[in-house]
Amino acid sequence: LGYTFYHGYKVFSKLPPDSAISYKFVNHFMACTGGGILVPIFINIVPIPLSSDLYPLAIASSFAVHYFFPIVRQVLSQSALFKSLVIVLYETTRAYVVVALTTAAGKAIPASTFSFPVFGPIFCGAIAGCGGAFLPLNKGLDPIKSGLQAPMLSALI
């Protein structure tokens, strides 16, 4: 829930307050599931939101909190303790997703030059950690125009 909540904090902070609820929800959903949709498609497995019923529930719950109780975002921006807790939960979940999808890519992608796959799992791990920044896919390379953001760099490493 910390992962989806922090994504909601970032999405709702960027969008204009008068945006349609459907636009906010789809933006929130894509930010939360970016790499969990793209990487499974690349390696031909079921995407995370379809394989886990809890994940869409966590996304919908955090969306409801952000939409109906916007004061929680203000608390998050002003309380260093609460923000630290949410960021720890966010990064823990993100690290789990990166490792899980990198491992799945290592099993799904056959070895070519070396005795084990090297670059395919690395690329999939990088996309797993920051794929939501590029969704919807009409953004092109704009998310990295001014350089790699910290989550992108940490997912690549």
Image (tube, grey):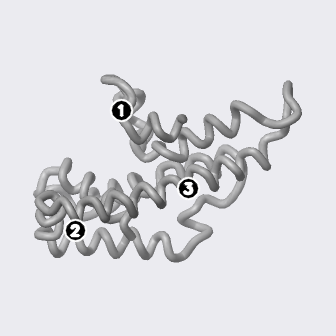
Please tell me how crowded label 1 is: few (under 14), some (14-19), or many (20+) other residues with Cα within 10 Å: some
Residue at screen point 21% across, 64% down: 81
Tag 2 or tag 1, which sits nearer the N-term?
A: 2
- Vertical side of 95 occupied by 116: above or below: above
Residue type, mark 1 in image: Pro
Counting every numbered tag in the picture gives 3
Q: Are marks 2 and 3 in contact (CB under 8 Å)?
A: no
Q: Secondary structure at mark 3?
A: helix
The percent position of residue 125, horizontal first and vertical second, equals 59, 42
Q: Secondary structure at mark 1?
A: helix
Image-based side of 112 in relation to 5, left or right: right
Tag 3 or tag 2, which sits nearer the N-term?
A: 2
The percent position of residue 157, horizontal first and vertical second, equals 54, 35
- Vertical side of 51 occupied by 109: above or below: above
Residue at screen point 47% across, 50% down: 34
Residue at the far right: name it: 115
Q: In the rendered view of the protein, which quadrant contains the N terminus?
A: bottom left
Residue at screen point 11% across, 69% down: 71
User: Which disc number belongs to residue 66?
Assistant: 2
Image-based side of 144 in relation to 16, left or right: right
Q: CA distance from mark 1 to mark 2?
A: 24 Å
Image-based side of 57 in relation to 85, left or right: right
Residue located beneath label 1 in the image:
143
Residue located beneath label 3 in the image:
97
Residue type, mark 2 in image: His
Residue at screen point 20% across, 48% down: 14
Tag 1 or tag 3, which sits nearer the N-term?
A: 3
Q: Pick whichever, 77 or 135, lies toward us.
A: 77
Q: Secondary structure at mark 2?
A: helix
- Vertical side of 44 occupied by 76: above or below: below
